[in-house]
Amino acid sequence: MSQHVYWHAPLWEVLLVGLISLTFLGWLIMRALRRPDLSAALSAISPALSDQPLFFFERVKGVTCLNDAAEQILNNLPVSQQQFLLDVLTETLLEAYEEARVTRHQDWPEAEHALVAVPIFGRPDGVTGVLALVIAEIPPPPAERPVDEHLAAEPEAWLTLSPVLRLHRTRPVVHVRRIGPNAVATWQEYRLSHTEETLLRYLLEHQAEVQTAETLFRAVWPEDEVDSYGLRPDQKNRLQRLVYQLRQHVEPDPRNPRYVCTAHGIGYVLYLEQEPTVQ
């Protein structure tokens, strides 16, 4: 014999339970349908990401701003150049997408800034999207002084490494031909630090030969022990910083190095346009 239990409740309790259930269900639906705030998510990872303008490109959706900094850049484009700058943005990202390589556009959206686009490989057969960011570029350091003509008049004292780069045979001094703000190319003189000179002369001895990071570190800092498994993070940072400083002094355009080049995953190599000769 079965027994049935009935719940006798006032109408207001039934309505209250129903209202609470509907409210909770509505909250779940809103959570499921709500578009995630990418800017807040990036800021939660690191506050620096919220200040770094980030764009994403897909073939179907086109260019998407990933944070407020990117939207602010687009909103503040000069009216007279707005369409041109938008076209440059789209073409740079599209080029990275179609050619599956990192692309870069100087002076976007203004001078001393650059747009860098990096393809994202999400499937075996190609690129799924492109991540782009705007970076501030550090201008080359001011020359210590213009080239002294009487120094340049000592041809036996200088090694000509390229048409725009000379190295003194015995002193830590280089002459670099750079284009100044007035668009005129002039020779500038820079004095190298001891570690910069050591690195440059070692690379010069092994021109066009890729040198591992461990080899270069030992050449510059022979007193520091290098572990068998490679450089420690602090040692890698020290070498990278030294290469950066050297490029600031020997590259005609340090933002686009063409002599002291990175061999990704290995180390660095010195490429010259000619064999070093006595001037």
Image (cartoon, helix red, strand yellow):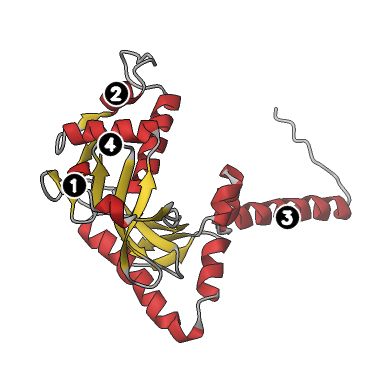
Residue 211's x, y, as percent? Answer: 21, 30
Q: Quadrant of residue 278?
A: top left
In whole angstroms, how far apart are the C-alphas of marks 4 and 2? 11 Å
Residue that label 3 marks = 23
- Point 34% across, 55% down: residue: 148
Decide: is 231 above or below 188: above
* Mark 3 residue type: Thr
* Mark 1 residue type: Leu
SS at badge 3: helix
Decide: is 247 above or below 92: above
Return the residue nearer the eye: 48 or 100. Answer: 48
Residue that label 2 marks = 219
SS at badge 4: helix
Residue that label 1 marks = 161
**First in sequence: mark 1 vs mark 3:** 3
Residue 59 appears in the picture as rendered = no
Residue 54's x, y, as percent? Answer: 47, 58
Mark 2 residue crowding within 10 angstroms, few (<14) / some (14–19) / many (20+) = some
Asked if the residues shown at circle 3 and circle 2 are in contact, with their CB atoms under 8 angstroms apart, the answer is no
Mark 4 residue crowding within 10 angstroms, few (<14) / some (14–19) / many (20+) = many
Asked if the residues shown at circle 4 and circle 2 are in contact, with their CB atoms under 8 angstroms apart, the answer is no
Residue that label 4 marks = 200
Return the residue nearer the eye: 96 or 156. Answer: 156
**First in sequence: mark 4 vs mark 3:** 3
In whole angstroms, how far apart are the C-alphas of marks 1 and 3? 76 Å
